[in-house]
Amino acid sequence: MEILVTGSAGFIGFHLAKRLIEEGISFIGIDNLNNYYDNKLKKSRLSELDNSHNKNKKHYEFHEGDLNDRNFLEGIFHKYNPEIVVNLAAQAGVRYSIENPQTYINSNLVGFHNLIECCRNNSVKNFIYASSSSVYGGNINFPFSEDDSVNHPVSLYAATKKSNELIAHSYSHLFQIPTTGIRFFTVYGPWGRPDMAPFIFTKAIKNRNPIKVFNYGDIYRDFTYIDDVIDVLFKLLFLPAKRDLTFNKNEPKQSSSWAPYRILNIGNNKSISILEFISMLEKEIGIKADIQLEPMQPGDVYKTCADTRTVDNLIKNRCKTNLKEGLKQFIQWYNSYYRS
């Protein structure tokens, strides 16, 4: 059974690809290797995958290409006929979406539609795609549940992710494609994204540069360790969405459907103050941070916290890495990668 992983040079895509290689499962990886952040890091991830592949001797191929290129995608599907597709290729970043909206329309809407259309034409048996905790927008009921209303996004990035969920439902209904949307909550860990808080703060602390903390420090995030995310994603590869036989159209759930469709939160179910998070980084690095308190940024949300009961019930015995251990692993990788 062939698996296609898009965004395989990205943070989460790379870790899923590495897990597949370690498990001896054949797959195809694609990525457009854009320059949203340092391309050297993406190429280093690909080199790491090549090293793992050489050790395990299982079928793995990487192709550079863009989801906006319909001919490229159709060629991949024609050649490999994947039955499982995991879409982790998207333009990320809330603040960047304010400055570069067209990039998000191209990648997160046009590219997403091209991919799910290929899934339809090739009778894919399981389509998993990255959504985001950003869809919860200005919600104030914590923790965030998949059945909460998410009709008030506060960034274009969040709006594109909500749009992906709506498109996926229409394809699940019309063409019976099992679709699972994953709302990720602030994923961190080794090989992480340079535009994310753990990376930004670590680099600033080590270089003794100031850290901007928004909303004057009154901001909270549900940090989720990458290995825990990958454990869930790996199991979901073989658990396609099914029709909810209890679905009541008079009282409709937001997270399931009469169609083979579902939405799942993947988070740590714990929210921590950014100031406390920085304090933990200071202790791990051994350097005091220079904190500059700033007003709230446009598009940001005050707090995120995941209600994970749905995925916990679906996937039993799911481990959760505590933040102290996760940051230790991240800092060890950072020091090794940057030789600092």
Image (cartoon, rainbow, N blue to C red):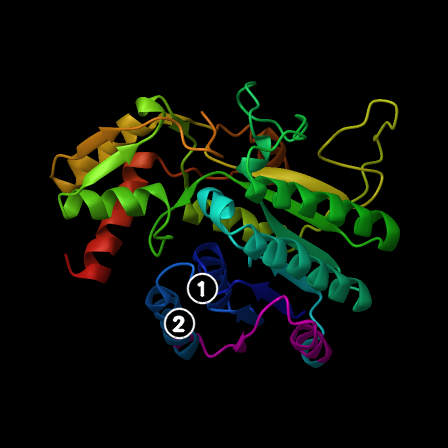
Q: In this view, does 335 lie to the left or right of 316?
A: left
| Nearest to the observer: residue 227 or residue 142 | 142
Q: Which circle marks residue 18 in the picture?
A: 1
Q: Which amino acid does label 1 sit on?
A: Lys
What element does badge 2 sit on? helix
Q: Is mark 1 on a helix, strand or loop?
A: helix
Q: Which residue lies at the image location 58% right of the left edge and 55% below the top edge?
A: 102
Examine the rendered structure and indicate whether residue 210 appears above or below residue 41: above
Q: Is 73 covered by the magenta stretch?
A: yes
Q: Earlier in the sequence, mark 1 or mark 2?
A: 1
Q: Give yes or no for contact between labels 1 and 2 (Cβ–Cβ under 8 Å).
A: yes
Decide which of 249, 35 is in the foreground and name it: 35
Find residue 140 and report its horizontal and vertical position in percent: 54, 19
How far, Cα to Cα, is label 1 from label 2?
A: 7 Å
Q: Which residue is drawn at 39% across and 72% down?
A: 52
Q: Give the range drawn in magenta.
A: 55-78
Residue 42 sits above or below residue 51 on the image: above
Q: Mark 2 points at which residue?
A: 52
In the rendered image, the vertical position of residue 331 relative to residue 292, given as above or below: below
The amino acid sitting under disc 2 is Ser
Apparent side of residue 170 relative to residue 13 in the rendered image (left or right): right
Looking at the image, residue 188 lies above or below residue 133: below
